Image (cartoon, grey):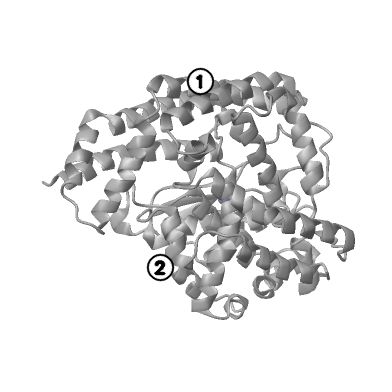
Amino acid sequence: MSNVERLKNRLADFNALTSAVAIMEWDQQTYMPRGGAAARAEHVGILSRMAHEMFTADETQKLLEHAKGETRDGTDEQALIRVTQREMDLRTKIPASLVEEKSKLSALAHEAWMVARANNDFAGFAPYIEKMFDIARREAEYLGYKEDIYDALLDQYEEGATSADVRKMFGDLKGPNIQLIKDIKERGKPVDDSGLYGEWDERKQREFTEKLVKTIGFDFNRGRQDTAPHPFCTGWSVGDIRLTTRFKPYVGSAIFGSLHEAGHGMYEQGSPTEWDLTPLAGGVSLGLHESQSRTWENIVGRSKAFWKRFLPDLQTTFPQLKSYDLNTWYRSINKVEPSFIRVEADEVTYNMHILVRFEIETDLLKEKLKVKNLPEAWNAKYTEYLGVTPKTDSEGCLQDVHWSGGSIGYFPTYSMGNLLSYQIWNALRKDVGDTDALIEKGEFQPILSWLQKKIYSQGRRYTPKDLVMRVTSKPMGAEDYLAGLDAKYKEIYDL
Ligand SMILES: [Zn+2]
C-alpha cells in the first residue's frame, strides 16, 4: 500500500468520527428531546477530542510527510495533501491548552449571552467579550500573519482572504450601497408587504418548500428537509445532505430559508463521489458556500421569472394570497427596509450589518475600541450606515451568537458570498444564455449543471481565490453586485 493510500485510510477514520459528531449535532437541533442535552454535550465533546487527537497524532503527521514525496503536480492526491496540510496547520499551531480554554469559555459565554440578550444586560456579557477577544489575539499570534492580526483569524474561515481584501470590498460597497438605501427610503415608491404576514398551515408550507427545492435540483434521494429553530444545512456524505427550515408568521421565512439552505445542500451534493469522506469533498470556503445559498435564495428565488412559474402554485396552496398579481408579489418579497436585526435583513441592507461588525471586531481586536464603549460605537454605526438607531442592546450589539463562540473574523464571509453570487451569476449567464426564460419554464437543470461543473464538482481542489479566478476570470469585486442591485431595485422602487 502506498503512503497516500495509508493517509487516505487514516483520514477516513477521522472522517467517521467527525461525521458521527455532525449527525449528533443535527439530531440535537431537530429531534432530540430536551432531556438529552447534557449527555449529548458530553458525547460530542469526547468524540470531538478523539477526532482532534487522531488527526494531530504523530502517526498522521508522519503519513502526511511521507505521502508528500509520492504525489505529482496537478493531481487530486496533491490537492488532498495541500488541504490536509492546511487543516493540520490550523489544528496544531494553537496549543491544546488554549483550545481547551476557549471551549470552556465558549460554553460559559454562550449561556451568559443568552441571559444578557433576554435581559438587555450588556454589562453582564461584557467580561466574556473581553476574554474572548483576548483569546482571539493569542490565537492569531499562534496562527501567524504577515500584515494584519485580523488576517490570521479571517483565514480560518476564508483561506487566503485578508483584512485588506475586506477593507477594499467595503470601501467599494459602502458609498453606493448607503446611497441606494437612502434613495429607496426617501424617494422610492412604497412597498407594502403586510399581506405576507399571517397564519400559514405548517404541513402545507413543508410540502410547498419541499416541492420548490426538489424542482430547483435538490436530490431527496440523497438528502432530506426537517425543521430547526435556526435553519442550517449539514451532511456527512455526498449521499446524505440535510436541510432545515422554519415556519414563521412571515410566509417568506420558510420559502427563502429553504431555498437558501438548498443552495448550500446542492453544493454539497455536487461533490465528486470519489472524494467522498475525504477532506477534498464539500465546499471550498464559507464565502463560496454562501455565494451558492444566496444565488438560489435571492438571484433565482426572488426573481420575477421564478414567481411567474411558482406564484400560481403558491396561490393554490394558500388561497389567501389569491389577490396578488405577479408584480405586486415580486415587489413585496423584495421589500427593502433598514432594520436592527441582521438575520432578518433584506438583500440591499444586509452588507451594512456586516460592515458594522467588521469594523467593530477589528477595533476590539486591536484594542482601539474598549469593550465598555461597544454599544455606543455599534449604535453610532447603525445610525450612519442604516439610518436606524437600536433602542436596546438586545436589538443592537447583543443580537449575534458569533462572538460568544469566539467566531471572530467570520462575518465578512457573508458579504463575500453576496458579492460572489452576482459575479458568478454573470459568468454563468455568458454561457447559459437567457436564464429568465429557463427559470420561467421551471427548467433549472442548465443552471445547476453549469454550477455543478464549474464549482460543485471542484470540491476543495483549488483555493477559494483560485476558484473565483477560474470561474469568473477576475478576482472578487463589488461591481457585479452593485450593478445587479441597482438594476433590480431601481425598477422595483421606481427610481
Ligand atoms: Zn448560508
Closer to the chain start, of discs 1 and 2, is 1
On screen, residue 450 versus residue 491, left or right, reads: left
Judge from the rendering whether residue 343 lies leftward or rightward of residue 419; answer left or right: right
**Label 1 near ligand 1 (CB < 8 Å):** no
Out of 58 and 69, give the one closest to the viewer: 69
Is the residue under label 2 in contact with that under label 1 (CB below 8 Å)? no
Separation of disc 1 and disc 2 at Cα?
A: 42 Å
Is label 1 in a helix, a strand or a loop? Answer: helix
Please state the horizontal and vertical placement of residue 258, each as a whole percent of the image.
60, 55
Residue 19 seen = yes
Q: Which mark is residue 33?
A: none
Quarter placement of the C terminus: bottom right
Tell whether 194 sits left or right of 249.
Answer: right
Amino acid beneath label 1: Lys
- Residue 137 is situated, as x and y percent measured from the top left of the image, at 52, 27
From this view, report whether residue 407 is shown above or below residue 411: above
* Badge 2 density bin: few <14, some 14–19, many ≥20, Cα 10 Å: few
Residue type marked 2:
Lys
Which residue is located at x 45 percent, y 66 percent?
A: 471
Residue 453 numbered mark, or none: 2
- In this orientation, which residue lies closer to the viewer: 479 or 393? 479
Disc 2 is placed on an element classified as helix
Which label number is shown at residue 104? 1
Figure quadrant of residue 306: bottom right
